[in-house]
Image (spheres, rainbow, N blue to C red):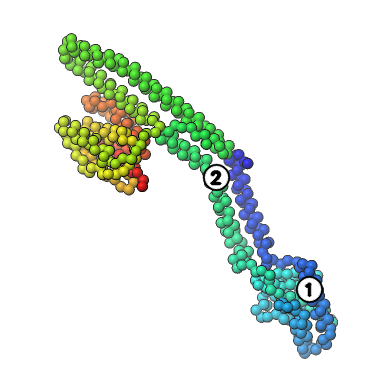
């Protein structure tokens, strides 16, 4: 077994090429219409007929006016049953042939005219044999035999042998399934590697022992791939542990800060400085929570998924958002509510994704927010518009990065942590969807989420 992919492809290429060339060059020689030497039994039969014809002519006196009748009588008398004899004179005249046979007779005479080496050749349903030398006094004739062919080739096979290009095409068609199977077997390790890479892209950091098989090149690639997955898994685990440790260490002084703030308020009463300290502590607490959510969602290999209906999934998110909008004097309008569209996903992650973009719109809008749900045969599209200040075109792709801020003052006033849209993008990508930002007809920002529907 050839283990090298390069050697295997090279061997398959030359084997196929040699096979095609051999078939094209050798198969025509299998044509039963090819001229071939006589068998010993056929040779003896021909010599016996030759002797009988010579004896018949010797016993029949010659007549200058009716010479050809003597020849007809001789060949008719000694022709084997179901067969016919022909005589060809030294001038090239053919005695005993029918008019429709003259073309094949002339063709055979041109190929076999040596009585020392008589041959035979098939022409469709008949076969010609000869020549045998017949002496008639001073005249010499060549004797040929026309007999039925044992088994005639089909017209299609004859057509193939007569047209090499057609033979080449038939050969290629016959070899195509073999070549397709060989190509499939060679490409199988590449497909496995591609599927494994797709799993890694979806966050499934699992080693694939089946990749370490097949040709040497793919075996080495599979081993390197599994090593890479192991390294990524160690890095992700170390990062999660680091974030968890940092969050834990930050919460301890944060709790002490909140406790000290409460003690100061009790001793000295309310003050602007205490309010600012408390606000920043709450903001830091929210940032730690968001950071932990983002870390877990980014590095969680597989979400628990179930069948969901869009209208039931997001009903509470919409109701809560409308209530919060009323409390701050803003209007949240659902221009097209979600329908009972079926999708497969994690309800917590999808709830969080919609809630974050709606809260983002509530935070930055002036007065009005619009939410629109549509669906087609492929998926669900959610558009959330606001009439806020919007985001410049060069910043639209960056706002999904963790901690990215287009305006520090705005984020300080709104209380944003810069992690909400990063959480949205992670959740949507885990469900094989996408999210992007555009200009809104309301004058602010439009955020669009697309999620695939459950395939029936």
Depth check: 103 or 348 in front? 348
Residue 317 position (above or below residue 378): above
Q: Residue 185, labelled with which disc?
A: 2
Kindly report the distance in space between the C-alpha atoms of the residues bearing marks 2 and 1.
58 Å
> What label does residue 16 carry, if any?
none
Within-10-Å neighbours for mark 1: few <14, some 14–19, many 20+? many
In the current view of this chain or complex, which residue is farthest to the top? 267
- Determine whether 370 is above or below 149 in the image: above
Pick out the residue farthest to the front.
306
Q: Quadrant of residue 280?
A: top left
Closer to the chain start, of discs 2 and 1, is 1
Residue shown at 25% from the left, 16% from the top: 258
Circle 2: element type: helix
Residue annotated with mark 1: 46
Seen in the picture, residue 435 relative to 404 is either above or below; the reply is below
Question: Is residue 388 among what the camera can see?
Answer: no
- Which residue is depicted at the point 35% across and 30% down? 297
Closer to us: 112 or 216: 216
Residue 199 found in image quarter:
top left
Q: Position of residue 381 (x, y in %)?
A: 29, 42
> In the rendered view, does 117 fall on the left or right side of 433?
right
Q: Is residue 440 left or right of residue 69?
A: left
Question: Mark 2–mark 1 contact, CB under 8 Å?
Answer: no
Q: Residue 312, how many percent across, how many down?
A: 26, 39
| Residue 339 x %, y % | 26, 44
- The mark total stands at 2
Q: Please report the residue visible at 83 percent of the width from the left and 87 percent of the height from the top.
A: 61
């Amino acid at each position: 077994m050839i283990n090298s992919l390069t050697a295997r492809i090279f061997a398959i290429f030359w084997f196929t090429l040699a096979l095609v060339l051999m078939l094209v060059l050798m198969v025509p020689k299998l044509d039963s219409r090819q001229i071939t030497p006589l068998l010993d039994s056929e040779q003896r039969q021909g010599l016996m007929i030759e002797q009988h014809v010579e004896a018949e002519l010797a016993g029949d006196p010659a007549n200058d006016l009716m010479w050809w009748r003597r020849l007809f009588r001789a060949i008719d008398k000694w022709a084997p049953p179901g067969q016919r004899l022909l005589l060809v004179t030294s001038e090239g005249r053919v005695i005993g042939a029918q008019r429709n046979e003259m073309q094949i007779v002339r063709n055979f005479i041109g190929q076999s005219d040596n009585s020392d080496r008589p041959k035979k050749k098939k022409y469709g349903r008949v076969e010609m044999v000869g020549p045998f030398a017949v002496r008639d006094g001073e005249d010499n004739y060549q004797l040929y035999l026309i007999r039925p062919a044992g088994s005639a080739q089909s017209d299609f096979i004859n057509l193939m042998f007569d047209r090499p290009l057609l033979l080449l095409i038939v050969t290629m068609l016959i070899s195509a399934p073999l070549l397709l199977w060989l190509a499939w077997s060679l490409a199988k390790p590449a497909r496995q590697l591609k599927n494994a890479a797709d799993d890694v892209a979806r966050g499934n950091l699992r080693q694939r022992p089946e990749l370490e098989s097949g040709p040497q090149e793919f075996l080495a690639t599979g081993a390197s791939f599994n090593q890479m997955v192991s390294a990524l898994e160690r890095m992700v685990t170390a990062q999660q542990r680091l974030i968890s440790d940092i969050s834990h260490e930050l919460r301890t002084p944060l709790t002490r800060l909140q406790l000290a703030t409460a003690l100061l308020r009790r001793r000295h009463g309310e003050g602007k400085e205490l309010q600012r300290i408390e606000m920043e502590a709450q903001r830091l607490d929210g940032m730690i929570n968001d950071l932990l959510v983002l870390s877990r969602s980014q590095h969680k290999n597989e979400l628990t998924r179930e069948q969901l209906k869009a209208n039931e999934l997001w009903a509470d998110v919409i109701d809560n958002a409308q209530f919060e909008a009323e409390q701050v004097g803003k209007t949240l309008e659902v221009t097209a509510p979600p329908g009972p569209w079926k999708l497969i996903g994690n309800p917590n992650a999808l709830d969080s994704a919609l809630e974050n973009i709606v809260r983002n719109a509530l935070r930055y809008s002036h007065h009005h927010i619009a939410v629109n749900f549509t669906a087609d045969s492929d998926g669900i599209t959610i558009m959330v518009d606001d009439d806020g200040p919007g985001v410049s075109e060069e910043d639209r792709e960056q706002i999904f990065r963790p901690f990215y801020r287009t305006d520090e003052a705005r984020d300080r006033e709104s209380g944003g942590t810069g992690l909400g849209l990063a959480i949205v993008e992670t959740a949507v990508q885990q469900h094989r969807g996408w999210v992007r930002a555009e200009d809104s007809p309301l004058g602010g920002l439009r955020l669009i989420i697309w999620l695939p529907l459950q395939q029936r």
